[in-house]
Amino acid sequence: MEVVLEGVRVEREGRVLLDVPSLLFRRGRTIAILGPNGSGKTTMLRVIAGLDRTRAGRVLIGGLPAHASRVAYVFQEQVFLRRSVRENLELGLRLRGLDESERKVRMEEAARLLGITHLIDRRADVDIVAEQLTQRALRLLRQQVDA
């Protein structure tokens, strides 16, 4: 899917975090985003995922505004570890607007496919393997939502 940033500017507390006049990620390409700490790499990814708002400009993903597209973002830090694997899986589906019965079906199917049904109700921070499996499951669920 093609990603376009046009005149994107992100500011917080009067400080410019991101200023991108024009950038195009062509469909079917693998892109590496490199730069020193504080250069805006994560901010740009969060803007593309629709998690951060821009002060100016626009982001299009497949021709749609970022907030209307179906993009997943995996946080670089583990932010939901105090929850169970099930709750971690459910969160992404809930944020996508799936109703409870659909979430349950998708979570059970993902757990079965990944072979983690025995871990589903364990806290993700108790076992690093559970966390790794949660991340794999989140990616799998994301692919199912797109299908």
Image: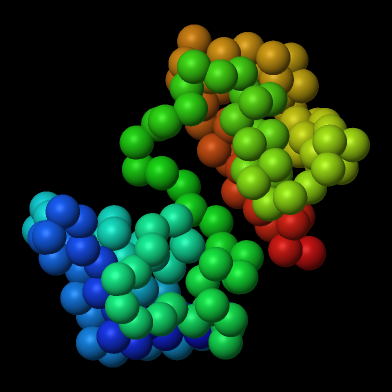
Nearer-the-camera pick, 142 or 98: 98
The image's colouring method is rainbow
Task: Determine whether 58 is above or below 125 in the image.
Answer: below
Task: Determine whether 4 is above or below 34 in the image.
Answer: below
The residue depicted at 38 percent of the width and 63 percent of the height is 53
Give coordinates of residue 51: x percent, y percent. Answer: 44, 56
Which quadrant, please, contains the N terminus? bottom right
| Left or right side of 41 for 85 | right
Task: Determine whether 26 is above or below 53 in the image.
Answer: below
Residue 10 figure quarter:
bottom left
Say if residue 25 shows up in the picture: no
Which quadrant, please, contains the C terminus? bottom right
Task: Determine whether 26 is above or below 74 in the image.
Answer: below
Give coordinates of residue 31: x percent, y percent. Answer: 36, 73
| Left or right side of 109 for 24 | left
Nearer-the-camera pick, 98 or 32: 98
| Left or right side of 89 for 61 | left
Residue 47 figure quarter:
bottom left
Give coordinates of residue 22: x percent, y percent. Answer: 28, 89
The residue depicted at 19 percent of the width and 75 percent of the height is 19
| Left or right side of 109 for 2 | left
Say if residue 84 shows up in the picture: yes
